[in-house]
Image: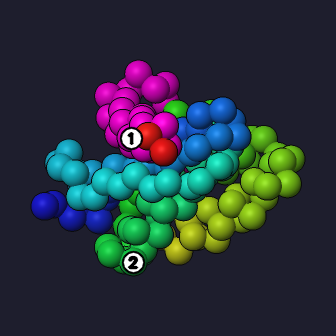
Amino acid sequence: MDLTNKIYIYTDGASRGNPGISASGFAIYDSKGNIIKEEVVYNGIKTNNYAEYNAIILALEWCKNNLGTDLEIELTSDSELVIRQINGVYKVKEITLKPLYKKVIEVMQLFKYIKFQNTPRSNPKIAYVDKKLNLFLDNIESNIEKR
């Protein structure tokens, strides 16, 4: 594992029903393209935007707790809305997103450098996280249907 203090994070969130059952996921790569950590978590009944924000928070918190804050981070998400809100292009109007936005701003300030960018879901690393999320939610739906 190469930790040259630059890492790449790819995040995604999913909600079936919006709001509906939702999950947040991320994959963190070192500068050589090796996965350092990947995770998917269940959020309960939430919106897609909640799931997108939560994925970013989970990834940054994991980095802070496991890699420290002396990092250069390039974080990529397919959520244009969330990235533009974090970058100050859009205002956060939805009341339920404001605490999540504030948490991202609070955590990001701990790191040496962080860049947030948006890319389409067709990006292979975003598609990887998206696939993990969908398999996870398929499993949850399958378990619900069996009850």
Callout in the foreground (2, 1): 1
Q: Residue at x 48, y 45 (%)?
A: 147
Q: Please rate how many residues cluster around mark 2, counting C-alpha atoms within 10 Å: few if below 14, some from 14 to 19, many from 20.
A: few
Tag 1 residue: 139
Q: Residue at x 86, y 47 (%)?
A: 93
Real-space Cα separation, disc 2 to disc 1, in angstroms: 29 Å
Q: Position of residue 82 (x, y in %)?
A: 65, 43
Where is 109 relative to 38, above or below? Answer: below
- Secondary element at tag 2: helix
Q: For residue 65, which numbered disc appears in the image?
A: 2
Q: Quadrant of residue 63?
A: bottom left
Q: Position of residue 44 (x, y in %)?
A: 59, 53
Q: Residue at x 27, y 51 (%)?
A: 29
Where is 47 relative to 31, above or below? Answer: above
- Secondary element at tag 1: helix
Q: Bounds of the magenta span?
A: 116-145
Front residue of 34 and 55: 55
Q: Is residue 124 left or right of residue 49?
A: left
Amino acid type indicated by mark 2: Asn
Q: Position of residue 12 (x, y in %)?
A: 48, 42
| Figure quadrant of the N terminus | bottom left
